[in-house]
Image (cartoon, rainbow, N blue to C red):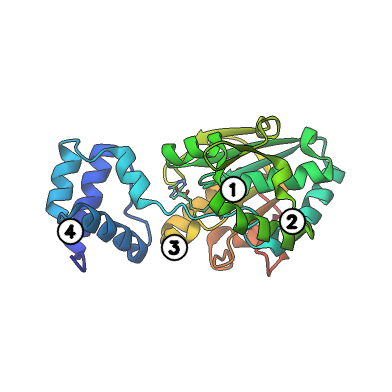
């Protein structure tokens, strides 16, 4: 199958919403379609059969979510962003007793591990609480396990070296049999991992710093607007928001509540409620 019609897209979105309670109708249609086509191709089926499989439970909610979401991530992804984050955390710490951070769309946790390292190196771990959320339960389970295959370590190491000048990221891991590195368990205790679907979420806490990087890009403008409103409601006045390198808030409803702190690294400060 090479394309999916608008009607087929509507039908599968409807079936998923009815059966699993997830609403993908406001995802960016081009990437959503690409992921659907990948599912169809891998399973050698058409949309009609996928809908049947969803309805008769032979394609589970977990299978679907795992296939439809894009979980690509890296430790210290965009090293210059992490340099800016280091400066930002230092100034947040100077004016606060505690720093509360929300990683929204944390995938398998590499962004969270990076944050823990930055905080540890700044001596701020004890001052920090981190909540890390994702829609995908299976990716959260991987994040909690915090295992990195040796073969992926090179990219993390390279990014960390660009961030800090040191290549020794391994000191934060223990090497285990079976070619995996496991992230420092004591540091991970700072993190509470939770399942949160940004489409349905309501403000659940207040934070000093929210990272929602490389997540908005999968949503259409309406959903980006709603999610940014949710995030804004979850930020204290003076709190910081970081989005991905290809994402923007300039056009959306909440943009007048934010000042740009670092345009290049897409970091914004909430100025007023
Ligand atoms: C490309 S990853 C980004 C990971 C990390 N933030 C980074 O920049 O490296 C996008 C993540 O967003 C999550 N996601 C997609 N839709 C979501 C939703 N409705 N609610 C919460 N998370 C969602 C996916 O499961 C995936 O783990």
Within 8 Å of ligand 1, the CB of disc 3?
no
Rendering coords of residue 70 (x, y %): 42, 54
Which label's residue is closer to the chain start, 2 or 4? 4
Q: Is residue 259 visible?
A: no
Seen at 18% across and 49% down, the residue is: 50
User: Pointer 2: residues within 10 angstroms few (<14), some, or many (20+)?
Assistant: some
Q: Pointer 2: what residue?
A: 167
Q: Residue at x 13, y 49 (%)?
A: 49
Provide the secondary structure element on which disc 2 rests.
loop
Q: Residues within 10 Å of mark 4 (few under 14, many from 20)?
A: some
Nearer the viewer's eye, disc 4 or disc 3? 4
Q: Residue at x 54, y 34 (%)?
A: 145
Q: Which residue is mark 3?
A: 221
Location of residue 17 in the rendering, given as x and y in whole percent from the top left corner: 27, 43
* Mark 1 or 4: the one toward you: 1
User: To which residue does mark 1 refer?
Assistant: 110
What kind of element bears circle 4?
A: helix
Q: Is mark 4 within 8 Å of ligand 1?
A: no
Q: Are marks 2 and 3 in contact (CB under 8 Å)?
A: no
Residue annotated with mark 4: 8
Residue 66 lies left or right of residue 201; in this view the side is: left
Observer-nearest residue: 172 or 90? 172
**Distance in Å between CA atoms under marks 1 and 3:** 27 Å
Tag 2 and tag 1, C-beta contact below 8 Å: no
N-term mark: 1 or 3: 1
């Amino acid at each position: 199958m090479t394309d999916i019609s608008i009607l087929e897209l509507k039908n599968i979105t409807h079936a998923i919403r009815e059966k699993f309670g997830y609403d993908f109708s406001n995802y960016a249609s081009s990437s959503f379609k690409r992921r659907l086509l990948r599912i169809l191709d891998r399973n050698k089926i058409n949309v009609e059969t996928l809908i049947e499989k969803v309805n008769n439970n032979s394609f589970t909610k977990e299978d679907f979510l795992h296939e439809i979401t894009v979980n690509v991530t890296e430790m210290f992804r965009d090293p210059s962003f992490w340099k800016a984050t280091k400066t930002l955390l230092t100034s947040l710490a100077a004016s606060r007793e505690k720093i509360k951070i929300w990683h929204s769309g944390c995938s398998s946790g590499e962004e969270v591990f990076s944050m823990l390292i930055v905080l540890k190196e700044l001596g701020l771990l004890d001052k920090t609480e981190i909540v890390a959320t994702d829609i995908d339960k299976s990716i959260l389970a991987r994040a909690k396990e915090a295992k990195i295959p040796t073969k992926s370590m090179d990219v993390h190491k390279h990014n960390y070296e660009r961030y800090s000048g040191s290549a020794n990221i391994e000191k934060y891991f223990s090497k285990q049999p079976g070619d995996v590195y496991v992230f420092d368990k004591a540091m991970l205790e700072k993190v509470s991992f939770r399942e949160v679907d940004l489409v349905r979420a309501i403000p659940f806490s207040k934070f000093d710093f929210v990272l929602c990087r490389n997540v908005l890009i999968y949503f259409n403008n309406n959903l980006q607007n709603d999610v940014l409103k949710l995030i804004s409601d979850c930020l204290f006045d003076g709190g910081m928001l970081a989005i991905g390198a290809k994402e923007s808030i300039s056009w959306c409803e909440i943009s007048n509540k934010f000042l740009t702190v670092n345009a290049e690294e897409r970091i914004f400060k909430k100025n007023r409620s």
